[in-house]
Image: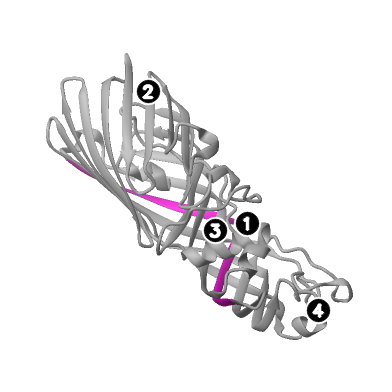
Amino acid sequence: MRRLLLLGTVFALPTAAHAAAGELMAITNPATVDARPTLRVAATGFAADDFVPAHRIADTWRSAPDPRPGRNLAVGFGRLEASQSWGAWSLGTYKRVDAFGEGNRDTVRVYYEQQSNPDALLAQPGTRHLDYHFKSFSADGLRLAWSQPANSGPLRFGAALNLLKAGFLRIENVTGSAVSAGGVATVNGRRQLLYTGLDYTDPSRADLNDFAPLARQNSSEGWGYALDLGMQWAPHDNLRLRVAVNDLFGRLSWQNVPQMVQNFNDASWPLQFNAPTAQAKITGTNSYRDYTLQLKPKAAVAAEWTQAEWTFGASAAAMHGLILPEASVAWGRTDSGRLALSYEPRFKSVGAAIHYGPFFASLRTDRSKLNDARAVGATAGLALRF
């Protein structure tokens, strides 16, 4: 699972000076229009999970995880972008990273125990159900966006076309059970791994966890596309509503992606894992396959109410059954300095942001000690108007 959840800290593009949940999922709103031509360079990121400090998720866990009952999540969304707007149009280039993992509590505990404390696993008789799914990818993009101009009225719409060049891909699914009895854990289940980062190993030198097809092939990253839509409505001078949907009809393609399939049939583990009798009970295939990823749409809604120099906001972002709501409050104006605080309850993270002239930055965490934080995020950027 350590290799599976390579979330790290990733980057995204903030679309405005306010704090909104859409930034947590790197959602952009093409209905946002600049009053003057603007060169914008921005980066932000959000990574969170339910069971260990976020910065440790890709390393050996030093302490036992504390998973929640039921569905445990590990997510990361990001974007690094440079763009230029003029009038109703905007052209930008960017790099994006998306990662979404989910597993039950048994899976999290079995992963930790078999890596760090197998004796504890063997000493506790019982059945543990394994259910884990992870998907991540990266892509470089070129984005052409259009929005109705600011003088078109209180209701504005926008759209953006994205041309994507595929980067890495990792998809993994694990299902089955692990039964501990008499000092031996017996595993029944199936593991499927589709990963552009798998290195080829000669079959004569391979072990159970090596990728060793009979013939080596070269993988290649293909192209893709996606559509973004946005809306912004100001029914009153002090009230603004926004809606954005990203990755509509989106898809990305790869050719010759390495794939491993492993079937565990009463495989004794870990005490007899290297015994020939155990190896014979682990079967599977090593091959290459072409793959087209259908992107999951991401949506965000937000409302802001302004009174004098105060702004109060409520927003939510959603994707693939995950909903991240957020509440925020801000004081000041961007030309003279604006401060904002926000809170999202799913991972219990608090954000603080500053916007002064062309510069904006923010930091969020769920704990005062970043080394212990399970949710971390940061934003920084410049918006130079001409």
Find residue 142 and report its horizontal and vertical position in percent. 51, 47
Number of other residues with Cα within 10 Å of mark 3, as a class: few under 14, some 14 to 19, many 20 or more: many
Number of other residues with Cα within 10 Å of mark 2, as a class: few under 14, some 14 to 19, many 20 or more: many
For marks 3 and 4, give the CA distance: 34 Å
Circles 3 and 4: CB atoms closer than 8 Å: no
For marks 3 and 1, give the CA distance: 14 Å
Q: Earlier in the sequence, mark 3 or mark 4?
A: 3
Q: Is residue 172 magenta?
A: yes
Residue type at numbered disc 1: Arg
The residue where tag 2 is placed is 355
Mark 3 residue element:
strand
Q: Which label belongs to residue 275?
A: 4
Mark toward the viewer: 3 or 1? 1
> Which residues make up the magenta segment?
155-179
Q: Is residue 310 left or right of residue 3?
A: left
The residue where tag 1 is placed is 2
Judge whether 172 appears above or below 21 on screen. Answer: below
Mark 1 residue element:
loop
Q: Earlier in the sequence, mark 1 or mark 4?
A: 1
The residue where tag 3 is placed is 136
For marks 2 and 1, give the CA distance: 37 Å
